[in-house]
Amino acid sequence: MAHDKPDTEPNGDRGSYSSSRNLEAYPGSLGQPQRTKTTAGHVQTPSFAGRLGGNQRFTSSSDSVVTADAVRNASWARLLDPTDFKHLSIWKYAIIEGIATCLQLFLGLCISVGLLPTGDATSLGPVTPVAFASVIQVFVIALFVYSTGPLTGGHLNPLITMGTFFAGLSSLPRTVLYIVFQCAGAIIGSLIFRESIGASPADLVVVPGCWVDTSIVTPGQAFGFELMATLLTLFLAFGLGLDPRNAGPLGPGLPPILIGISSAVTVFGGAIARPGYLGASMNPARCLGVAVASHNFTYHYIHWTGSLTAALLNGGMYFLLPPYKM
């Protein structure tokens, strides 16, 4: 199958390409080094179609690549091939995903738990802490995507990883490893946070995005909220940071900021929608970490079923109007 010519020239290393031409065309867009040479102006980066914010720029046209998801429009036979489990690079990237998820969750809990008491401080009620959290969310998401995108693709969220898989942008081995390490990182980050502030498990039961008042919110209502919020998150993330048709208009530097803004808008809208619901999870690994730290798994299955359903629906929409001519 013929592939569109990538923005860079293959350099002979399997699964990587020289990004010197990319650097000239897109200042500041350093790729993820598999093997970096110190030669001035020459940086090598592995190819990955599911790099968030990359809009599939960082892909290869070569069929002799290390990972199946290094090329655009890879076949499902290649994406489902378990051979990628043998590649050490995939494991390294998964470990980085886990570490970054741990750090992001620790920071997120500091913000959300710290802001929660301010809900009673003004007449606006929960609108105040939600507004502050939404503004901070823009920077948190953008900074982590900028930091980890060149290394792992910047997912840090099983929702994004599942979304790229069902859209054919991420191989099955990468998807499995990423989700496992994202969940492990989230659990570790939550436990470190709980012990760092000297909290008990009961103190972390009510965490925005992971808590639902079961006395007034039914499982069906919670699933509906979670499904729509996660589908909205994926729809915007794909359009802004994964669809190659936006690569030219947005450039390489703007998508992470726009993804942060879209996430913040979703957080704000979901958190003020109704009493008893402090917003959608939009990251099942985050709520898994909170559930383990708080010993409370009420409605947690909805965080996963909502994300999985949204990823399937988004994948279906992606294939309805594929970016490449079939």
Image: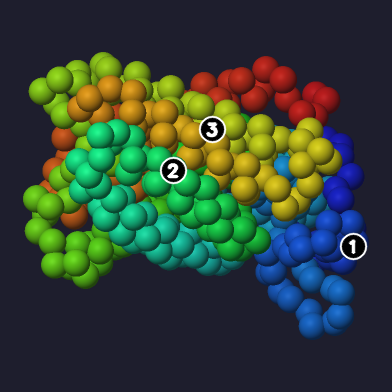
Residue ID at (82%, 61%): 27
| The one of 229 and 131 positioned closer to us in this rendering | 131
Point out residue 166 in the picture as x, y percentages from the top left corner: 55, 32
Q: Which mark is residue 234?
A: 3
N-terminal of the pair, mark 2 or mark 3, is 2
Find the distance from the CA under tag 2 to the CA under tag 1: 35 Å
Residue 161 vertical position relative to residue 40 in the rendered view, above or below: above
Q: Which residue is mark 1?
A: 24
The image quadrant where one finds the N terminus is top right
Write down the quadrant of residue 39 in the picture. Answer: bottom right
Which one is earlier in the sequence, the residue at label 2 or at label 1? 1
Q: Amino acid at mark 1?
A: Glu
Mark 1 and mark 3 in contact? Answer it, CB < 8 Å: no
Q: Quick one: label 3, few (<14), some, or many (20+) residues within 10 Å?
A: many
Between the C-alphas of marks 1 and 3, the distance is 31 Å
Circle nearer the viewer, 2 or 3: 2
Q: Residue at x 65, y 61 (%)?
A: 150
**In the depicted view, which residue is nearer to us: 56 or 121?**
121
In this rendering, position of residue 17 left or right of residue 300: right
Image quarter hosting the C terminus: top right
Secondary structure at badge 1 equals helix
What colour scheme was applied to this rendering of the protein?
rainbow
In this rendering, would 49 be left or right of 293? right
Residue 208 visible in image = yes
- Residue drawn at x 66%, y 37% as measured from the top left: 240
Residue 85 appears anywhere in the view? no
Quickly name the residue at label 2.
134
